[in-house]
Image (cartoon, grey):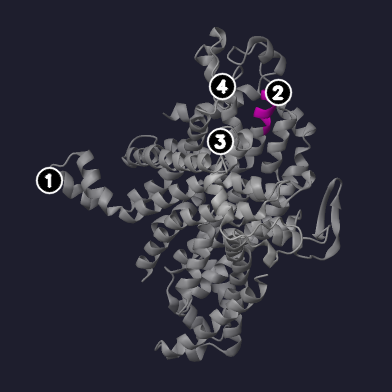
Amino acid sequence: MANTTTTTAPARAVRPKAGAVAISGRRRRYTLLTRRDKILLALMVGVPLALDLILIWGPTLASILLSFTNWDGIGDPTSKNIVGLKNYQFMFTGYTLFWPAFTHNLIWLLWLTFIATPLGMLFAVLLDREIRGTRIYQSVFYLPVVLSLVVVGLIWELQYTPTDGFINNALGLVKSGHIIDWLGDSRINLYAILVAASWRHIGYIMILYLAGLKSVDPSLREAARVDGATEVQTFFNVVFPVMAPINVVIVVVTAIEALRAFDIAFIINQGKNGLELLSILITNNSLSEASLVGFGSAIAVILLVISLVPIVTFLTRVMRTSA
Amino acid sequence: MVLLWLFPLGWAIFTSLRTYGDTALHGYLSWPAGGLSLANYQTFFVQADLPLFYLNTLVVVVPGVILTLLLASMVAFCCTQFSWKFNLTVLMLFTAGNLLPPQVLIVPLFQIYLHTPIAMLGSIDISNFSFALFSDNNLLYDQYIGLILIHVVFQTGFATFVLSNYMKTLTKEITESALVDGANVFRIWWSVILPLCRPALAAMATLLFTFMYNDFFWALFLLKTGDKRPITTALNNLQGEFFTNNNLIAAGALLVCIPPILIYVVLQKQFISGLTLGSTKG
């Protein structure tokens, strides 16, 4: 197990810190911190950090290691379990669900990025102007965000079910016999649940963007108006560039949401028949009867590698603003 | 647009208020001939044993939120009030950890939970609800504390990020002068910094409550016993049980979303400031 390395890591991380104060030139504070204070501080950072390393980063690293094995979760993994890149080879060439799932995640990402997120931003821009009842509108658009995806899934099932759902009834399709199986037809069900997911995502983006818009210096807009710019011009040429930091946050949030997508697809049909997603393939392979721990881990590594793109983007931004 | 947004929810409410017989006879898109009633809510509440699942959620979410805030505020305090060399590294480890998709770590985590021995010290029983101290199978798997633990550790990442952004705005002189007065760092954290962070803590508490309440994934895989499931995860099973009766499912879904909606309506300001603290000041 990784236990031996993870338990010593916090202790190691803390020791140089105590020294760092002494050379940081702020001698006054150095002398203020007693030995006891330093031990307390080490514990206050060390305990949460140890938990984070053991339960978050440890398993993440373990996923990478396990992806090179055929371990099935029974007994301890031994050197006999090492199979090299076989899991990856099978995943890319033999496993028929991988590329569909990959494509669905990609569609999810593109849909959120080019449809849901821009809509959320548009709502934010519209509601940012002093219109009557803007607070009520905000509350309404934000309402779905506080609901769990399980509830969102069930609420939209009431819209989509073939004979009893609102949509088919309202379109008169039930009467005429041309029933559309929104959630059962593998050509359209992904888009059907993307609509449901967007119902929630748009409000989330709207609130984040609205907070960003409020922090834009109003004199910038004033200046643009004096110069005769239209409202659309002002947004794209003045406000949007100033909002660069929040734009990054929103792109990152969107990408992470798309990669984490799991709940709705799982609730509708356990992620089958057109709703396969990478996240669901991981659990289906490794946490089911099949117990293909090694193979599921290989899929997890793919998801991890993709996730690192938005995560690193976000961290570099945090670094830049903190430095 | 607003009406369009409310429609799915409104339709669910409308469906939930009608009897099954009425909709089966006249279809769902019809004027309610049988009148509207709260009978479905009552049926679901009793038949699905809803109080048990609400209680399951409560025993996970309340300690979960409190522990998360304690741990996160400690880390945020240490990393913002003192100029250590590794402050940024620590904050980044926490932040990045929270951004990982949970599915990336679930497989090894599941194995850790299956192989970590935990003491069994009896349990607290209230009718059909039983809270084990700390485990009833000697494992971390299928235990409330196991679920609390992963919620706390995972959300500490997010809470640390937000709280440290907030604490950066406090001047370090507060801590310094308290040190001069002879207070130890633990006391400064508890009786000086935490009270100053009350708005941020309140905002985080409402947000964390909703996150943990709405969690589906962790409880689905880290709990096995159906009777231990928190309400959000239980709802998915109940859906299978009542799948022929849309009206009942609608009532169930709405019952489950009442607590977060109440929190949102009452504490809207905290809720939104919690979300935006993380993004705008970062």
Of residues A226 and A260, the one nearer the viewer is A260
Q: Which-is-in-front pick, marks 1 and 4?
A: 4
Mark 4 belongs to chain: A
Mark 2 belongs to chain: B
Residue carrying label 3: A275
Residue carrying label 1: A227
Could you tell me if the residues under marks 2 and 1 are in contact, i.e. CB atoms within 8 Å? Answer: no
Q: Secondary structure at mark 2?
A: loop
Residue carrying label 4: A181
Of residues A45 and A29, the one nearer the viewer is A45
Q: Secondary structure at mark 4?
A: loop
Is B248 contained in the magenta span? yes
How far apart are the two marked residues, 2 and 3, measured between alpha carbons?
24 Å
Magenta region, residue range:
B244-252
**Residue type pointed to by label 2:** Asn
Give residue B251's mark: none
Mark 1 belongs to chain: A
Q: Position of residue B267 (x, y in %)?
A: 54, 48
Q: Is residue B207 visible?
A: no
How far apart are the two marked residues, 1 and 4, measured between alpha carbons?
54 Å
How far apart are the two marked residues, 2 and 1, measured between alpha carbons?
62 Å
Count of residue discs: 4
Q: Is residue A308 visible?
A: yes
Q: Position of residue B205 (x, y in %)?
A: 58, 55
Disc with the residue nearer the chain's start (4 vs 3)? 4
Residue at the (79%, 65%) spot, across then down: B118
Q: Secondary structure at mark 3?
A: loop
Give residue B245's mark: 2
| Residue B208 higher or lower than A46, as above or below | above
